[in-house]
Image (cartoon, helix red, strand yellow):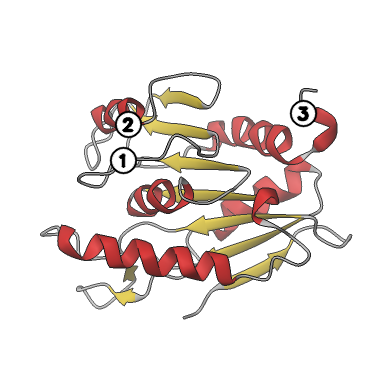
Amino acid sequence: MDDLLVQCHEDQPQARLLLLHGWGADASDLMPLGQSLCASSGLAMECLALQAPEPHPAGVGRQWYGLFPPQWGTVSEAVSQLKQRIKGIDQQQIPLSKTVLLGFSQGGAMALDVGCQLPLAGIIACSAYPHPNWQPGAQRPPVILIHGRNDDVVPVNAQAELAKHLNGESRSCRLITFSGGHTIPEGMQSLMVETLQSWLNPTNQDS
């Protein structure tokens, strides 16, 4: 699989931003966003974009599982495989506790399903939706859900469904909406940078 890795700081990376692209895209899709976030954060980070394992049926791009029509029966195996891939990433220098998972659309659904099973620093899910029968555990990383109010691909009510599973908006589950559709607008980047800093920079953490 053609994963992409970029070191975003001249110092040895102490934290990692993991990117999960959406249905029909590939590992390169979110890398410009990831690099911008890492650079703006001022943290010694690396950015790793994972490539979905399956070819998209249209012949261009990739998918984490079949989506149109949805092949929900394959989700469990897809989640299991991604979980093992993430656990298999070198953690000697950068542990999972210093890793943030960011996913968009289908990648957002995967990020939430997998990420809530791992001791990550946090999860940023953009335009995401819940997998059928998804039940996150009581112990999970903090989550931010970002969604366009005019999203006609994954309607914004999917954000409310995710929030129900995550026990509602709280300090560990923030809901952010914006006026727009199925995208990650540039105006959301400052919020994501602040989030990375609060999750990954020990000097900014509450005592």
Q: Residue at x 80, y 46 (%)?
A: 43
> Which x, y percent locates residue 104?
41, 49
**Is residue 93 shown to the viewer in this render?**
yes
> Which x, y percent locates residue 85?
50, 70
Q: Residue at x 38, y 32 (%)?
A: 147
Indicate the quadrant containing the C terminus: top left, top right, bottom left or bottom right. Answer: top right
> Which x, y percent locates residue 70?
14, 57
In the image, residue 6 sits, relative to residue 138, either above or below, namely: below
Q: Residue at x 89, y 60 (%)?
A: 11
Query: Callout 1, which amino acid?
Result: Gln
> Which x, y percent locates residue 151?
28, 35
* Residue that mark 1 sits on: 135
Label 1 packing within 10 angstroms: few (<14), some (14-19), many (20+): few
Q: In the structure shown, which secondary structural element does the residue marked by tag 3 occupy?
A: loop
* Residue that mark 3 sits on: 205
Distance of label 3 from label 2 (alpha carbons): 26 Å
Q: Quadrant of residue 191?
A: top right
Judge from the rendering whether residue 58 lies leftward or rightward of residue 53; answer left or right: left
Q: Quadrant of residue 160?
A: top left
Q: In the structure shown, which secondary structural element does the residue marked by tag 2 occupy?
A: helix
Judge from the rendering whether residue 67 lies leftward or rightward of residue 122; answer left or right: left
Task: Evaluate if marks 3 and 1 touch, with contact meaning CB atoms under 8 Å apart.
Answer: no
**Is residue 71 shown to the viewer in this render?**
no
Task: Evaluate if marks 2 and 1 touch, with contact meaning CB atoms under 8 Å apart.
Answer: yes
Task: Evaluate if marks 3 and 2 touch, with contact meaning CB atoms under 8 Å apart.
Answer: no
Label 2 packing within 10 angstroms: few (<14), some (14-19), many (20+): some
Judge from the rendering whether residue 45 lies leftward or rightward of residue 160; answer left or right: right
3 or 1: tag closer to the N-terminus? 1
In the image, residue 42 sits, relative to residue 179, either above or below, namely: below
* Residue that mark 2 sits on: 165
Q: Which of the pair 57/161 is nearer the observer?
A: 161
